[in-house]
Structures are given as structure tokens and as C-alpha cells.
Amino acid sequence: MSKMDNLYIRFYDPSEDFLNEPRSFCYELAMELIKKARDEDVNNWYNNENTLKGTLLLLYTWNFAARETKKLNFENVGKVIKECEENLKKLENSSIEDASRNDFLIVQRVFSKFKKLMGQTGASKALSLLNSKLFVMWDTKIRKRLNKELIRGISNGEKTEHYIKYLKGIQKIINDYRLKEKLQPGSIIAKKIDEYNYVKIIMEKSS
């Protein structure tokens, strides 16, 4: 890697390349379950059975190797979502581009509870499913790459404060590299960054 990490200088919409990952459709299926929950129960969708199914589907396909995932079930996932429901509702209109200091304080409370049950990687994936505009996924390889230079101080995400630093770092990267201008209008930039990180850091490294 060069002295300056130019990862995001080459940023583009990675949707087509991401489809080369065999599990890419699993996120879409999980999102369809979330949409079904919203349609069925607009005022109580966090507690809808389809929300739990979508969350479990995503984690059992995209975070299957984690020891925390093997302990997940309808009861404990439903419990943590219920405990965080009030704060999750407060974040529904927030996005990674414009998240405020107060938003990050709420994220800290929510992420801490999800992390305790799902681990630092699983928590980011589950929360991204529940609010894809704000929460950006990460994993060990992504943390390792970004911690070197682009978002220093996130370590391996052992602490909740590391994830807050990561989100603030992603927010700064969006602005500094003008990433939104490189996407089609209406794109969910938090999800596109996740896909881009996966394509450039994980898929290309293993090819």
C-alpha cells in the first residue's frame, strides 16, 4: 500500500461488482422481509416477526462464522430490538451524511446493546438492516485496512467508541472525497460504501 491510502479516490457505484459475491442476494431477501414488516405493521414493525426473520437471515448468512451468531434466536434478537426500539425510532430520519452529535450519542447506546449480543461485526450488520441510511457495516478486514490511515483509532472494534469513531470517519470521507457526487441520485450512500469496502478490501484481496 502506498504512503497515502487512495482507496476512496477511486470510489464508484460497486453494485455490479458486488453481485459476484454469492451471498449478495441474502441482503436483498432480508430487506424484503423488513419491507414486509413495515407494510404489515407500520407502527410496530420493529417487533414484527418478519423483522426478526430478516435480521436472523442476514446474520446467519453474512456473519455465520462468529461465535455470537450461533447463539442468536427469535427470543434474544427480539429482546434487544425491543429494548432499543425507542432510540431506533429517534434515528429513523438520520443518515450518515448529516448525522449530528446527538445522533451519535443515541447510536452509541443502541450499538452497545446490539454489540453485547451480536458482537461488533454482527451489530453493524443488523443495525444496517434496520436503518440502512445511517449504519455502515464493517468487519475485521475492513477495520484493519481503514485503521492504518483513513480512520485511525478504530482498532478491531472492541469498544463501542470505536464504531462511533468509524461512523464519524465515514462521514468525513463522504465529504472530503465528495462520494455522493459519484453515485446516482437517490442512492443510499451508507450501503454503497459498505459494498465498495467489501469489493475493494475483501473481494479483490482474495481474488
Image (cartoon, helix red, strand yellow):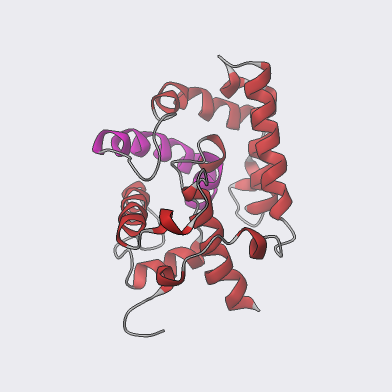
- Judge left or right: residue 109 versus residue 80: left
Figure quadrant of the N terminus: bottom left
108 in the magenta segment:
yes
- Judge left or right: residue 76 versus residue 102: right
Where 173 falls versus 72 (above or below)? below
Look at the image and give the residue range highlighted in magenta.
101-127
Dividing the picture into quadrants, the one containing residue 146 is: bottom left
Q: How many marks?
A: 0
Expressed as whole percent of the image width and height from the top left, the position of residue 175 reads 31, 55
- Judge left or right: residue 26 versus residue 177: right
Expressed as whole percent of the image width and height from the top left, the position of residue 205 reads 58, 77
Question: In the image, what residue occupies the spot 50% across and 55% down?
Answer: 183
Between 194 and 206, the residue placed more toward the observer is 194
Spot the residue most to the bottom.
2
Dividing the picture into quadrants, the one containing residue 113 is: top left
Question: In the image, what residue occupies the spot 37% across and 85% down?
Answer: 2
Where 111 falls versus 197 (above or below)? above
Question: In the image, what residue occupies the spot 70% across and 60% down?
Answer: 19
Question: In the image, what residue occupies the spot 35% across and 73% down?
Answer: 148
19 in the magenta segment:
no
Where 89 falls versus 164 (above or below)? above
Expressed as whole percent of the image width and height from the top left, the position of residue 32 reads 70, 35
Between 192 and 168, the residue placed more toward the observer is 192
Where 21 falls versus 130 (above or below)? below
Figure quadrant of the C terminus: bottom right
Expressed as whole percent of the image width and height from the top left, the position of residue 18 reads 65, 61
Spot the residue most to the left.
101
Task: State whether the magenta stretch is mostly helix, strand or loop.
Answer: helix
